[in-house]
Image (cartoon, coloured by chain):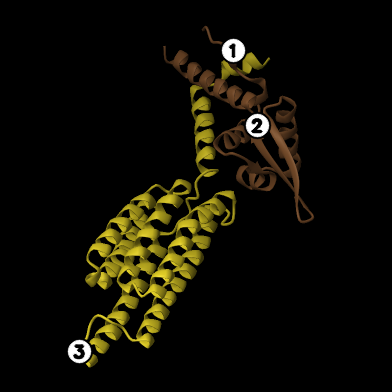
Amino acid sequence: MYFKVLLEMQEKDIYSELNSIRSLMERSTKFISLSGLSGIMAGIYAILGAALAYKIVYAEAMLKYQGSSLAIETLWQLIFIAAAVLIFSVVTGIWLTIRQARKKGEKFWNPVSRRLLVNMAIPLVTGGLFALALILQGSYELVIAACLIFYGLALISGSHYTLSDVKWLGVFEIIIGLLAALFPAYGLLFCILGFGLLHILYGSIMHFKYKQ
Amino acid sequence: MKISLEQFDKAFENRIRLQIMSVLVANERYDFNSLKELLNATDGNLASHLKALEKEEYIVVNKSFIGRKPNTQYSASDKGRTAFLNHLQALENLIKQQKY
């Protein structure tokens, strides 16, 4: 009986069967409802933050005629700006991702998105604490490099559970981070490049590649 | 047509069973509710097919509790993994046969 059914199975049916298997294997292992728009927004926040930081740092440098050491209040202002950029980016990212998941009929909170978050959180939290340690040690010049490098590592670690484009964003973040470590004087520039322009570029590519 | 029909697995005759197996082969484990959402299946339907696969010893069931809520995790057994791959191979062979 079953053999007869099989013999009647058309090539078309087999292809659709195989397609459904492939799509399920992918959907059950990869979270694909990432929103390109959130990358663009994160990039814009980062550039605004960097512009503000630039203004603060250089206003102080002009005032005191010394560029290297920062006053404690300035440091706190910079940390506050960085934290604000981070929070705005994360909130916008989560909001847009939930919206995107809803559009695609995918659940925002599923085993895959959970794995994605955990795998990103490990390098990210490590990097955050490491940056904090650098600040406490007074090695400010390496903070931006550390943020970029650990962020890149987090993206690569998370990319196994989502679209592979994320891996490339990670690779470029790491390269920019290493350059920032080599040329700490241009930290703010690398910050704009890595967190700002790269995010906008990546977000635009994702937006147009996966929008349809 | 000489097709090695014995490779075709009756356990995978049903589409949902084949889909369940695809998910479990691709993932270390998957829980009931996530499986249900992914496959768009009803509780009863999914449960009966999982039962069938369990009876074939193609999947391993692991029941536990998160707080007071039961949490049932499924994973593919070695036997199930092999059966699934054989079934895919058989599908592939069938396509090849029909080409000639």
In this rendering, the label closer to the viewer, 2 or 3? 3
Please tell me if label 2 and label 3 are on a single chain. Answer: no
Label 3, secondary structure: give it: loop
Amino acid type at mark 2: Arg
Residue A27 vertical placement versus B50 (above, below)? below
In the rendered image, residue A66, in percent from the top left (x then y), is placed at 22, 86
Q: Looking at the image, which is closer to me, A175 or B10?
A: A175
Label 2, secondary structure: give it: helix
Residue A197 vertical placement versus A66 (above, below)? above
Residue A113 vertical placement versus A185 (above, below)? above
Please tell me if label 2 and label 1 are on a single chain. Answer: yes
* Chain in yellow in the render: A
Residue located 76% across and 41% down the image: B44
Q: Residue under circle 2?
A: B17
Quarter of the image that includes the N terminus of chain A:
top right
Residue located 56% across and 57% down the image: A108
Amino acid type at mark 1: Leu
Please tell me if label 1 and label 3 are on a single chain. Answer: no
Q: Residues within 10 Å of mark 3 (few under 14, many from 20)?
A: few
- CA–CA distance between discs 1 and 3? 85 Å
Amino acid type at mark 3: Tyr
Residue B79 vertical placement versus A130 (above, below)? above
In this rendering, the label closer to the viewer, 1 or 3? 3
What is the drawing colour of chain B? brown
Asked if the residue under mark 3 is in contact with the one under mark 1, i.e. CB atoms within 8 Å, the reply is no
Q: Residue under circle 3?
A: A65
Q: Chain of mark 2?
A: B
Q: Which mark is residue B33?
A: none
Q: Chain of mark 3?
A: A
Q: Which residue is most to the bottom?
A: A63
Q: Residue under circle 1?
A: B5
